[in-house]
């Protein structure tokens, strides 16, 4: 049963609609790593394997290294390996080497890993034409697209690669610099033909505002960003994924409302607007979205950056970071969900 209600602060809340209550066959969760301040995961799929990396260190944005994780059974079990050590700038590709065929590459955050002559080489590109690289690359014919943002002008752009993700360059402005707005992280998805939709984070609004913009000419130009109703859809670090069944998944880190973990001692679920990882599904190319479901609570606002991997056959894998107590540090968490229940 789903019950909708308006709280005193006029935020739309959902009762009896937490994804973790869908049943053991529909929702399975795992803690991938919980050692230090573990945050900022990124995940993709190579063949039948889930591969990703995350930061770990002493505090927020103070990482010591990047750790790689890999699952060959759809997110049930994981292998981990230190991928990049900050101090000596060394790499370990052993966890991914057998997944990359000759001449093929994969992007993990700012790193492009490519195999040539049997050896994996890393190319690092953190910025392109002044924009910090952000989202997962998306196929656009012979090109790759991903987003970036400029933290000085607070402008979001579309970036393109002509060499399989080794180098990136500016293509167009998605969300232009606007007085009273701070546009930053965004994600894109192709709806059909040359049409794309973008969802953009904006930090000046008090309700975790998200904005949308549309391109009908393969990313050459974009419509003026339009604010979404935060009662229906909001959050930080939006992640958009087009699934093999044609539907779309939007997942965000919701940082408004009461803490998802009550004082770090318990989980608030029913009838409350809480912080957490929230998911939406569209079956009409983003024209309408399902009512939000919460994948996981987070304590206070220390959590987010969800990434979705399509497992096929109606299943998705999600990874995010979240702090669960007042004194604890965030961990890297994951789950698999049956999308037919969204």
Image (spheres, helix red, strand yellow):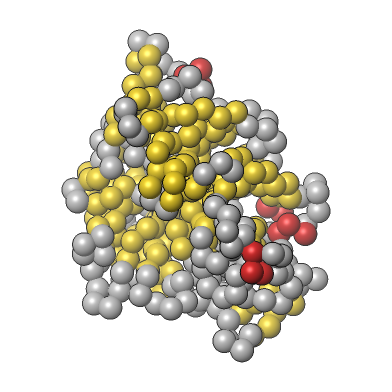
Q: Residue at x 40, y 65 (%)?
A: 201
In the image as oriented, which residue stretches furthest toward the front?
327
**Residue 209: image location, x then y, percent:** 44, 72
100 or 189: which is nearer to us? 100
Residue 336 relative to residue 88: left or right: right
**Residue 141: image location, x then y, percent:** 36, 39
Q: Is residue 162 visible?
A: no
Q: Residue at x 33, y 61 (%)?
A: 184
Q: Is residue 83 visible?
A: yes
Residue 232 relative to residue 123: left or right: right
**Residue 44: image location, x then y, percent:** 50, 38
342 or 15: which is nearer to us? 15
276 or 325: which is nearer to us? 325
Count of number-bearing discs: 0
**Residue 228: image location, x then y, percent:** 46, 74
149 or 102: which is nearer to us? 149
Q: Residue at x 64, y 44 (%)?
A: 31
In the image as oriented, which residue stretches furthest toward the left?
129
Q: Could you tell me which quadrant the C terminus lies in?
A: bottom right
Q: Quick check: 188 above or below 124?
A: below
In the image as oriented, which residue stretches furthest toward the top?
117
Q: Residue at x 74, y 73 (%)?
A: 270
Q: Could you tell me which quadrant the N terminus lies in?
A: bottom right
């Amino acid at each position: 049963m789903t019950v909708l209600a308006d709280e005193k602060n006029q935020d739309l809340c959902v009762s009896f609609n937490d994804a973790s209550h869908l049943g053991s066959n529909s929702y399975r969760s795992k803690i991938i790593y919980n050692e230090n301040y573990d945050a900022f995961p990124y995940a993709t799929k190579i063949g039948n394997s889930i591969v990703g990396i995350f930061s770990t260190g002493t505090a927020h944005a103070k990482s010591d290294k990047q750790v790689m994780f890999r699952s060959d059974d759809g997110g049930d079990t994981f292998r981990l390996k230190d991928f990049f050590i900050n101090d000596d700038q060394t790499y370990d590709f052993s966890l991914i080497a057998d997944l990359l065929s000759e001449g093929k590459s994969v992007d993990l955050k700012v790193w492009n890993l490519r195999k040539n002559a049997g050896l994996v080489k890393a190319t690092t590109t953190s910025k392109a034409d002044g924009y910090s690289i952000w989202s997962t690359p998306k196929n656009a014919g012979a090109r790759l697209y991903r987003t970036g943002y400029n933290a000085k002008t607070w402008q979001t752009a579309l970036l393109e690669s002509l060499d399989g993700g080794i180098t990136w360059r500016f293509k167009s402005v998605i969300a232009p610099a606007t007085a009273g707005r701070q546009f930053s992280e965004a994600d894109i998805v192709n709806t059909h033909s040359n049409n794309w939709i973008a969802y953009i984070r904006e930090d000046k609004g008090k309700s975790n505002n998200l904005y949308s913009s549309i391109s009908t000419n393969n990313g050459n130009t974009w419509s003026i960003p339009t604010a979404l109703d935060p009662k229906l859809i909001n959050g930080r670090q939006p992640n958009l994924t087009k699934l093999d069944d044609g539907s779309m998944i939007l997942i965000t880190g919701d940082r408004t409302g009461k803490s998802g973990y009550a004082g770090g001692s318990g989980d608030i679920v029913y009838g409350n607007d809480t912080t957490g990882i929230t998911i939406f599904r569209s079956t009409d190319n983003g024209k309408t979205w399902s009512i939000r479901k919460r994948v996981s609570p987070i304590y206070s606002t220390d959590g987010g950056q969800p990434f979705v991997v399509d497992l096929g056959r109606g299943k998705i894998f999600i990874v995010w970071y979240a702090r669960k107590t007042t004194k604890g540090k965030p961990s890297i968490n994951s789950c698999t969900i049956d999308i037919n229940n969204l």
